[in-house]
Image: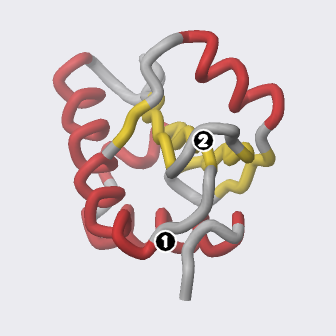
């Protein structure tokens, strides 16, 4: 899994990307010049304290890891968590992530 690390990489995705939303998260996807898919996860303080935010981030990363083999193309992705994700089931997170990636045209069938 290749990740976005620098602030300017996240800002590029926010500026150039197209958003798609669901109940618990938002996906911002932008075409990339780099090979493969790079991903970043953003969880704000609105979600909860540091323990809750880190748990949410770990669950989002694991859900992404299960979908990763089905992805194709050159894209930069940012998943932005909403406050309701803290109480969501893991299966719901996986389902919503899959639907967002399908809507963005990144998930290969």
Pointer 1 or 2: first along the chain? 2
Q: Residue at x 17, y 24 (%)?
A: 51
Q: Position of residue 73 (x, y in %)?
A: 61, 61
Residue 48, by quadrant, is top left
Q: Nearer the viewer, residue 37 or 47?
A: 37
Residue most extreme to the top: 7
Q: Which mark is residue 98?
A: 1
Look at the picture and state if 18 lies above or below 69: above
Quadrant of the image containing the C terminus: bottom right
Q: Residue at x 45, y 46 (%)?
A: 84
Q: Position of residue 3 (x, y in %)?
A: 40, 33
Q: Nearer the viewer, residue 65 or 58?
A: 65
Taking 51 as reference, is 63 left or right? right
* Colour approach in the figure: secondary structure
Taking 73 as reference, is 39 left or right? left
Q: Secondary structure at mark 1?
A: helix
Q: Position of residue 49 (x, y in %)?
A: 27, 18
Do the residues under discs 1 and 2 have CB atoms within 8 angstroms? no
Look at the picture and state if 109 lies above or below 39: below
Q: Secondary structure at mark 2?
A: strand
Residue 100, by quadrant, is bottom right
Q: CA distance from mark 1 to mark 2?
A: 16 Å
> Total label count?
2
Look at the picture and state if 86 lies above or below 74: above
Q: Residues within 10 Å of mark 2 (few under 14, many from 20)?
A: many
Q: Residue at x 54, y 67 (%)?
A: 72
Residue that mark 2 sits on: 76
Q: Residue at x 36, y 63 (%)?
A: 68
Look at the picture and state if 105 lies above or below 87: below
Taking 59 as reference, is 4 left or right? right
Q: Residues within 10 Å of mark 1 (few under 14, many from 20)?
A: some
């Amino acid at each position: 899994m290749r990740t976005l690390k620098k602030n300017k990489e996240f800002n590029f995705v926010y500026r150039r990307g197209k958003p798609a939303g669901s109940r618990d998260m938002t996906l911002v996807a932008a075409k990339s010049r780099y090979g493969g898919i790079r991903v970043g996860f953003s969880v704000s303080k609105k979600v909860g304290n540091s323990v809750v935010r880190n748990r949410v981030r770990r669950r989002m990363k694991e859900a992404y890891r299960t979908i990763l083999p089905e992805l194709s193309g050159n894209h930069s992705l940012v998943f932005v968590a909403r406050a309701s994700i803290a109480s969501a089931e893991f299966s719901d997170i996986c389902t919503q992530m899959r639907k967002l990636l399908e809507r963005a045209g990144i998930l290969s069938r």
